[in-house]
Amino acid sequence: MSKKFTLVLITKNNQILLGLKKRGFGMGKFNGFGGKVEADESIEEAARREVFEETSLEIKTLTKLAIIDFAWQDNKRPPQEVHVFYSDNFIGRPEETEEMRPNWFDIDKIPYKKMWDDDKYWFPLFLKKEQFKAQFLFDKHDKITSHQIKVEAL
């Protein structure tokens, strides 16, 4: 059974906020902000909490754009069901935390080579604010072995 996670991508003025992961799963890669959904919270509550913990930003509004299922062939990691949100309405300035170092990037200069391999496939849909569902299967080296993306309402 998949564990539920959140991922929030924050934009403003034709820029996107990504964080450099400083420790743990995904260390050294740029990503959005998010994490595990705890048993006592909704997916949206988890998204807001994780953004605050990783950036000190308070999210005012969230829009769900995707559900992405991730799995690994070697089953060393449990499958993940990631709920992807967009926000351009927040309070505060992003601050570095123990886990993430936030950086603003121009939309046309997203550092795909320093991100997860799957991002280059679905980011264009996200940037157009299209809703979609996707599935990605990774090998033991975190390289994509198969994927499927379907534009559809959530």
Image: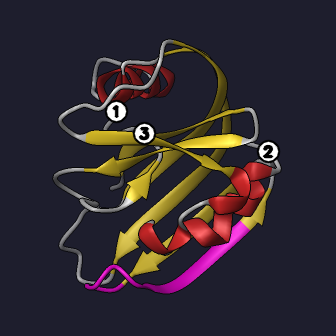
Give me the residue at 17% from left, 35% from top: 98
Magenta stretch contains residue 147: yes
Near mark 3 (Cα within 10 A), the count class, few <14, some 14-19 or many ≥20, is: many
Disc 3 from disc 1: Cα separation? 13 Å
The magenta span reads: 139-149
Q: Which one is in front in this view, the residue at disc 3 or the one at disc 1?
A: 3
The quarter of the picture where residue 129 lies is top right
Q: Give the structural element (helix, strand or loop) at label 3.
A: loop
Determine the CA span between mark 3 and mark 2: 17 Å
- Left or right position of 24 against 111: left
Q: Amino acid at mark 1?
A: Val
Q: Is residue 12 above or below residue 30?
A: above
Q: Which residue is mark 3?
A: 33
Comparing 152 with 116, the one in front is 116
Q: Quadrant of the C terminus?
A: top right
Coloring basis for residues:
secondary structure
Q: Nearer the viewer, residue 64 or 99?
A: 99
Q: Which mark is residue 129?
A: 2
